[in-house]
Image (spheres, rainbow, N blue to C red):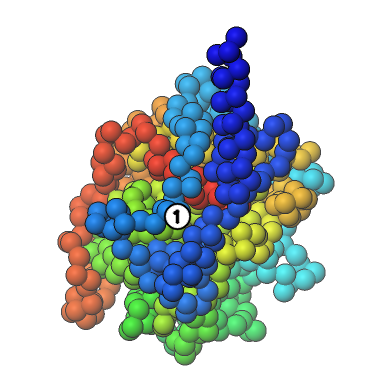
Amino acid sequence: MQWRSIVVGLVVLRLSLSCVLWLAFGLGPNVSWGFNFHLSFNLHKLDLLFREEKGTDPSGTSWSQRIQAQKYEETASTCAKAGEESARGSYLSFFDGNKDEYVRRYSSFPDTLKAKMKDMAKEMFYFGYDNYMKYAFPEDELNPIDCEGRGPDVLNPSNININDVLGNYSLTLIDTLDTLLVLGNVTEFQRAVKLVIDTVSFDKDSTVQVFEANIRILGSLISAHILLTDPKHPFGKVGFEGYDNELLHLAHDLAVRLLPAFENTSTGIPYPRVNLKSGVPPDSINETCTAGAGSLLVEFGILSRLIGDSTFEWVARRAVRALWNLRSNETGLLGNVVNIQTGQWVGKQSGLGAGMDSFYEYLLKSYILFGEKEDYWMFQAAYESIQNHLRRGRESCNEGEGDPPLYVNVNMFSGEIMNTWIDSLQAFFPGLQVLNGDVDNAICLHAFYYAIWKRFGALPERYNWQLQAPDVLFYPLRPELVESTYLLYQATKNPFYLHVGMDILQSLEKNAKVRCGYATLHHVVDKSKEDRMESFFLSETCKYLYLLFDEDNPLHKSDNKYIFTTEGHVVPIDKRFREKQWNDLFPCEEGALAEREPHSQPAPSNISNCNRIPEERRYALPLKSVYMRQIDHMVGLF
């Protein structure tokens, strides 16, 4: 019996030692004894404290303790110095424990579960769509709590949160057209197209934002028309007898009504709003955001090439060039708000979120669609400036010391940090990085946003990375994180991203589902709701969730390649869009543009770089467990 006493004594000794280490430093086993609390020590701050005591600044790879112009010097990591490490070691070593939990959770995803999630995404879409058609159509949106329709706020014209988007033109139905095809519902797609043709008119006394009308309405009409008339029929035979290009005519009519925004502006940058009947309102402001003015080229360019009229592409491209020429000579960055008459920057913040996001997105997507080299050159120069001035954290996503990569908001002229928040719209950027072939950076940034989602079951509109808390608490069912998840899965086929999609689906079902649809979360912590279901929930969020789990979707099996607009509308990469029936729009400026070309590789003919992820990593975790655990810690998950 003596050996049993020895074994028991050793077990007690180990448990005692683990408890001491756990209580002191969080180094012990991950045990909660059944209680829902965590004892944790902020090891990252401890690491910074050690550095300060040594008289050194924290590493240039550390952003989590940095504000404004504080500069931390870079910590060298060489083999020679590795042997001289003090007893404290690398703070990343503190995140090594329990790493197998990530492997166990994320490294596989059964086909049966994938099929279940696909059905769940489909049911989510139809619960919102069917209730919109039942309770709200022909109004623009569904109020899912009261089961009523919503249109423009005619009693309060200054309510731009509503009136910028809702134009009294059955917004949700139009915005959802191609989603019906993605889900394989040809019958309902054809019925919806006929409803749009029969009931929608843009001859309305509605003042709308040019950007929103473009991406939600114009883009959807063009996408549905192309899919209806596509001779390759990726979704089967979806055309119907009697269709006479009515959707294209509606798109043309809307675009003509948006053109006054480009008139009487000294810079060529458009006014932010127009009245669909009378043009630019007399009291219109002279300020617009970079994304709003510079994200029209995809839809306007496709329309021009479909109808053989260069006007629409010309005005959209002129606006992009005007914004581009206003960037800082020092940093190459743009601001987020500009005066369209003077060309002066009103908002000097440069970031990747609201006011900036789709400007970068459309530089790359315009090149993919139209093959115009200037779009690619601008994108590469912009991306280089972003990497040089906005990116903080360690150099490599999956190697080395320091904080994980993060893109912060900086002053466009100095590159100094302006604030310590990021917004949920920035979650689109990993998807854009995938399209650009920068999959490693995409993996890290996506993991940061996913950690925030895990903590709150949603993405707060703004999250303060220094305080580890939301700055703006609502979540309007935005699609950006789902979009990046889908594109990263397509690039890596890693089951991790299926788990991310499942978490998002289950969170939406639990936190946002109400009597007649899915409601905006007013507060991501207490999960209180607002009675609004924006059209992009059906157009994008549900679409990307469904496609994530539908491996056999025609979009994935077709010989043709497709791209998504910033509103998630499906557009084929078609040689028709690389042919123009007019001469170059800006022939006299080509020399000037050539002088500003970035020193980078020539524009590729095919920018698909998914093979950059080595085969051996495709079925391991996309991000090493130690870095996943580090990110989870940095957003307050433990």
Label 1 SS = loop
Q: Is residue 34 left or right of residue 318?
A: right
What x and y, as percent, mark residue 255? 48, 64
Residue depicted at 44% across the width and 74% down the height: 55
Is residue 212 at all visible to an observer of this figure? Answer: no
Quadrant location of residue 364? bottom left
What x and y, as percent, mark residue 158? 72, 74
**What crowding class fits label 1: few (fewer than 14 Cα within 10 Å), some (14-19), or many (20 or more)?**
few
Q: Give whichever of 621, 550 is nearer the camera.
A: 621
What x and y, as percent, mark residue 409? 49, 71
Please tell me whether residue 320 is drawn above or below residue 457 in the rendered image: below
Please tell me whether residue 273 is drawn above or below residue 448 in the rendered image: below
Residue depicted at 58% across the width and 38% down the height: 17
Q: Is residue 444 left or right of residue 187?
A: left
What x and y, as percent, mark residue 469? 65, 59
Q: Give whichever of 199, 583 is nearer the camera.
A: 583
Q: Is residue 515 left or right of residue 195?
A: right
Q: How many marks?
A: 1
User: Which quadrant, please, contains the N terminus?
Assistant: top right
Please tell me whether residue 635 is drawn above or below residue 415 in the rendered image: above
What amino acid type should be assigned to the residue bearing mark 1? Arg
Residue depicted at 20% across the width and 60% down the height: 603
The residue wearing badge 1 is 88
Farthest bottom residue in view? 342
Farthest top residue in view? 1
Farthest right residue in view? 146
Q: Give whichever of 192, 348 is nearer the camera.
A: 348
Is residue 160 at all visible to an observer of this figure? Answer: yes
